[in-house]
Amino acid sequence: MRYLLLFLALCGNAWGQNIKIGELNSYKVFAAFLEPYKKGMELALEEINAGGGVNGRKLELIVRDDGGTPGDAVRVAEELIARDRVNVLMGTFASNVGLAVANLAAQRKILFLASEPLTDKIVWENGNRYTFRLRPSTYMQTAMLIPEAAKLQKKRWAIVYPNYEYGQSATASFKRLLTQAQPGVEFVAEQAPALGKIEAGAVVQALAEAKPDAIFSSLFAADLQKFVREGNTRGLFKNTPVFNLLAGEPEYLDPLKDETPNGWWVTGYPWSEINTPEHRRFRDAYQKRWKDYPRQGSVVGYTAVHSVANAMRKAQSADTEKLVEALKGLEMQTPFGPIVWRALDHQSTMGAYVGQLAQKDGKGAMVNWRYADGARVQPSDQDIRARRKE
Amino acid sequence: MSAAAVLLQFLNGLAAASSLFLVAAGLSLIFGVSRIVNFAHGSLYMLGMYLAVWLSAKLGFWWSVPLAAAAVGVFGLLVEFLLLRRLYRAPELLQLLATFALVLVIKDFALWAWGAEDLLGPRAPGLRDAIEIAGRPFPKYDLFLMALGPAVFALLHFLLTRTRFGILIRAATEDREMTGALGVNQRWLFTAVFAFGATLAGLGGALAIPREPANLEIDLSVVSDAFVVVVVGGLGSIPGAFLAALLIGEIKAFCIGLGYSKVTLVAEFIVMAVVLVLRPWGLLGRPASGPRGATAAPFTLESKKLLLAVVAALALVPVFSSGYALVLLTDVLVFSLFAVSLHFLLGPGGMVSFGHAAYFGLGAYGAALLVLRAGMPMETALLLAPLAAAAGATLFGWFCVRLSGIYLAMLTLAFAQIVWSIAFQWDTLTGGSNGLIGIWPASWLSSRTAYYLATLSLCCLAIAAVWRVIGSPFGHALRASRDSPLRASSIGIDVRAQQWTAFIIAGAFAGLAGSLYAFSKGSISPETLSVPRSVDGLVMVLLGGVQTVTGPVWGAALFTWLEDAVSRDVAYWRAAIGAVVLLLVLVFPIGIAGAARKWLSR
């Protein structure tokens, strides 16, 4: 009798039970990005389950708030592992939270699909067997802007960035890559305001005093809006081209409205203009489901869930070790076109759109854009192996 | 910098100072009169911003400003009338807990009402563009702000020195009990001052919208700036607040102008530390008279049998669960120890710390660095790390015990922020904003059960040790120093030495909590040193009850459990936690342990 029960329990485990994705994110701290992200995830989940689930089992999302701090996030991840018995961990936004959960995933030997964090370290210096990252990293997004930046042949550059790891590594990568592409370039001023606390007037003034030919910025959210308004008022951008990471993402572009500076080069997501079949299908489905347009976060959430499902299909299993092997080299379709999950460093080749900002009817938009494939903005394999300490 | 650049940066500093002054003035008035540490002041500012953005779309910017300020004022009036009024008789600092709960509720309200996206307000009509000053464009609106700051200052000065209302405010700021004894209706005065301070906060927020977007993160960043300005200037001193705002505004502008923008991360806290060390009551403040005859109940340990039963039950948990219960209980134990160490300083020591996370974080970083950089075995690192925290407490405590009351609290905050900024910036040693990862327990402790049992035994021993100290001759001398420094020193107690020692003991035990925390998480980041961590500690102590011995433990358990339980199932979980805390504050103003003891002894 006991064995029969055990057998039944095992069968139940294998066939009846849902496959669980444990998703943890800072839903309250970064609500502007993560509300669309959640909608993207739910859309993907509905699509997958409407099509019969994965390997004959339904997919289930267990969504938790990680409180925005590494300590709380680790506790929540432990709960997802121990209490909810999830098959895969997914999510996180801030880099320090992502790194902490990646570290836990390696300790507990569970697959972690880091969807949002941008830090290079999560797949390089601190990369581990169980951690994979979806979004193009800080390095990749910086590298995407280099061709346009080098083409301008501007000699004197000023830089402004939020003073934490993202801004620091964006700045370091930009300096290194631009110097390689355009020897003799000078960096004449550097401003590193604290995240969320930029004194925009003083910063704009100090940058103007350095008389730069061009500006590179990695500001975003409230800092970006303050910088843009102050710079517009003080005429900083009149004759100075600006390159700004992330500023074309609807989450950060939309609040600018009639303040949107014309001609800035940015990375982002011109959702209304991408008319490839795969993107049109995604956009129509999203708008039908949510009566709202997709943001960058929507695409990330949507693609993350599909990535997990695809990995499970390829592995024919929800077993962690098999999933890790399946994700390595997994090729799949996304709203941005085909991507590959690189076996080398567990980074997906999802790209971003590079283009220029423009005002259209009092709203911000991206023009002259191109898709920058994530596969083409990588350092050499040898460099990566060295940074991964392999 | 050219002369023109210096002039322009000076003007930038003035504009920043004006907006700082507007928020700080209201906070200073409220604190001066009612002694309320109003954490929610930044939230009132944020409400002002959102209301102004919302109203300006309908009525235009200039109408939205007074309306938003008035609306926030009315809200302040209601808060005082419905909530704070019930708490003036409660033990000190409980209002702090109530305003902390308000912060959570207001934040979620703003999220619900206006959405997650930042809202960039309109430019001010008539002052949209810039004019040329020294050949450089300067926003007209900034000139307007520069004029407005001194105008509000002059108005407040007139109000305080020439009107009856102002005289009453000043009298209450000088000596609250005496003002009451002379027949002034304190209730009415408190309500009026709170509403007035809230109006100023709302005005500051509304006037900020042409310069920055309304966003959900602004509340805490504004309130910490405002506190620094108020304390640097001297509590309750409006001219002091004005001077401090100028000082901080200009220092920041010139840090940026001269290319030291990274310093702005902590500039105001460095200024505050320096000012408080040199002038213990701020630039223009005067020594405040403390509340008279405030003596706390003697500390007696509640039933030892009950406590032993709890420990025994905790030790048996692994028999029933090897999963998440242990993870959560490990957090509860670590935070209990942290709260107990803070309570030691705050209760028997009578020294409020707003920066206790510094020692928690020093312990955590100490442990991580000993393992990762010095290659020490985990067990040694775990036990040596508290020494790092004790060393920090020795240094900072020496300065802190020379102050008292809220000034002492703010100096602890300044030191904590300085430590935080060092951890945040020193990439090569501390891993910068990402922190340090890969700090796991030794293999024999790596299972959840083993680590839980280790945490349980260490925390119980440590907590028992702290409680033992409270009851020891040293503990008695410490309490004597708190209740009557003059009498204590006349019978030969070295008051400062007692307090300094208490600081070091509290620091060391907070460090042990931090060290245990680091190994339970596998990674640490500057968040372990941050203000929210300190605030959480205070909330735990106050929820449990300052006037009890075991209160902090129950407070820590309740708060940790609440966060875990509520954030799982409730969409607006921050507001839910805020609501529960408010309810507890109103029902159990002496903390849950205090209430339990009162109920048992009946």
Image: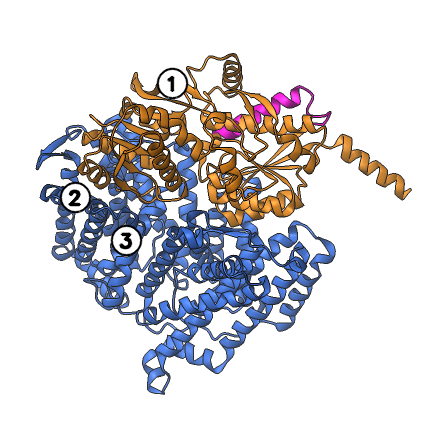
Q: Which quarter of the rendering shows the N terminus of chain B?
A: top left
Q: Which residue is mark 1?
A: A369
Which is nearer the eye, B337 or B574? B337
Q: Label 2 is placed on what type of residue?
A: Gln
Instruction: Please say whether residue A67 is visible from this viewpoint.
Output: no
Which amino acid type corresponds to the residue marked 3 in the rendered image? Ala
Question: In x, y percent, where is residue A202?
Answer: 21, 41
Badge 2 and badge 3 in a common chain: yes
Q: What range of the chain is rendered magenta?
A: A36-58
Could you tell me which residue is drawn at 46 percent across and 57 percent down? Answer: B539
Measuring from the top left, give residue B494's x and y in whole percent: 36, 82
**Cα gap from disc 2 to disc 1, whole angstroms:** 37 Å
Q: Is residue B502 visible?
A: yes
Task: Compare residues B445 and A176 and report the one nearer the observer.
Answer: A176
Mark 2 crowd level (few <14, some 14–19, many ≥20, 10 Å Cα): many
In the image, residue A151 above or below residue B296 = above
Q: Which chain is orange?
A: A
Query: Badge 3, how many Cα within 10 Å: few under 14, some, many 20+?
Result: some
Q: Nearer the viewer, mark 3 or mark 1?
A: 1
Which one of the lettered chains is coloured blue?
B
Height in image: B103 above or below B131?
Answer: below
Residue named by callout 2: B9
